[in-house]
Amino acid sequence: MMKKRSAHPKKEEIILSERYRLLELIYFVKNKRAGNRYSELYKAKELATGEFFAIKCYKRQNNEAWDTKSKELLVHEATVLKALSHPGVVGCDHYAEGTVVSGDTQVDWYYIVLKYVEGVTLLQFAPHCSEEQMLVHIMRECFQVMTYVNRMKLAHLDLKDSNIMVDKEGHVRFIDFGSALPVCGLKGDGRLDAWVGTPGFKAPEAKEHDVVRNAFAVDAFSLGCILFCLAFKFRPFDTETGEEMLAKGFTAFWAAVDTRLAGIRLQREREGKPKIPEIDSVPLRELISALMWPEPCCRPSMGEALFSPWMQQAKAKEIECREAMAKIKAIVARLVGS
């Protein structure tokens, strides 16, 4: 398998389908069973135009069942992205199959060509989100994008802080729709009998092999977890599953959060480190609680979240909102350049 290129001055060019030069490995996902890289995402440059793209690939494993599944996953993601047209969704140019050539090495790939976004993920941005208006701007755009996606009768089903980017213009861009499904289910009966989500962001009802009947609510729960991460700088369910913690009720949940926050503050003070820029208020906690409500039918829609008291009271401060946008752009530019 090809490895990410080193910083050695003599670099071999990596060419895909005689059309793209692969410039940088952005991330990879390992095949737990085989122990090798299963999925990779590259920054690439089209040879003819000089335009940048992101290329997501699955390498052929010489296993018919595995390769067929890999191809189906990419075709599915490309089909979903082709059905969406929104500035907050990173679009797909096309799906293809081709050969990667690096020196004397050739590897066959299935791949999709995505629009390239220069920016950072919310996971990278979170430690720098220091003001409420910055958080409001980010979440407003998240709710707006997902309102559109849900209106198109689709659910993302794997929302997390590493699947949402902030670009250099300060706008959010949703990526990785590989788990997205129609809300009516693949068979049209409203049943999403599939494994969805990522631990730490996954709704309690979205268990492996269980039937999920309210896909919109799964996305709402995940956005509640993302909002929590941006506000408090840690995941709400680091030590327990969401189901176990939420079963104790939100009074106990927020008491546990306050205890952890106090511990973090004390530890940083002892170590002489600066305070973590927490963002906290009663209306904010109420919105997080509503989004992460244990009963899916009780969670707000994306549109309802947009008009929640926390969003509305912050939205009224227009001057601060414009200043927050400028600060977000400056932070992203600094992180991209570092």
Image: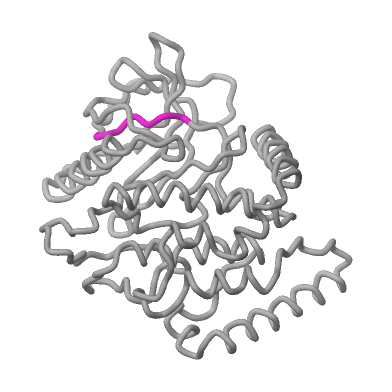
User: In the image shown, does 305 or 185 lie closer to the viewer?
Assistant: 305
Residue 5: image location, x then y, percent:
49, 31
Q: What span is colored magenta in the figure?
A: 110-116
Q: Residue at x 55, y 51 (%)?
A: 140
Query: Looking at the image, which residue is at 44% across and 57% down?
Result: 303
Tally of numbered tags: 0
Write the residue at 42% across / 45% down: 28
Please tell me whether residue 334 is drawn above or below residue 209 in the rendered image.
above
Does residue 319 appear to the left or right of 183 in the view shown? Answer: right
Q: In the image shown, does 99 or 115 lie closer to the viewer? A: 115
Residue 290 covered by magenta stretch: no
Q: The N terminus lies in which quarter of the figure?
A: top left
Q: Which quadrant would the C terminus be assigned to in this image?
A: top right
- The residue positioned 86% from the left and 71% from the top of the image is 269
Q: Which residue is the extreme one toward the front?
A: 316
**Side of 302 relative to 70 (left or right):** right
Magenta stretch, main secondary structure, is: strand
Place residue 181 in its image quadrant.
bottom left
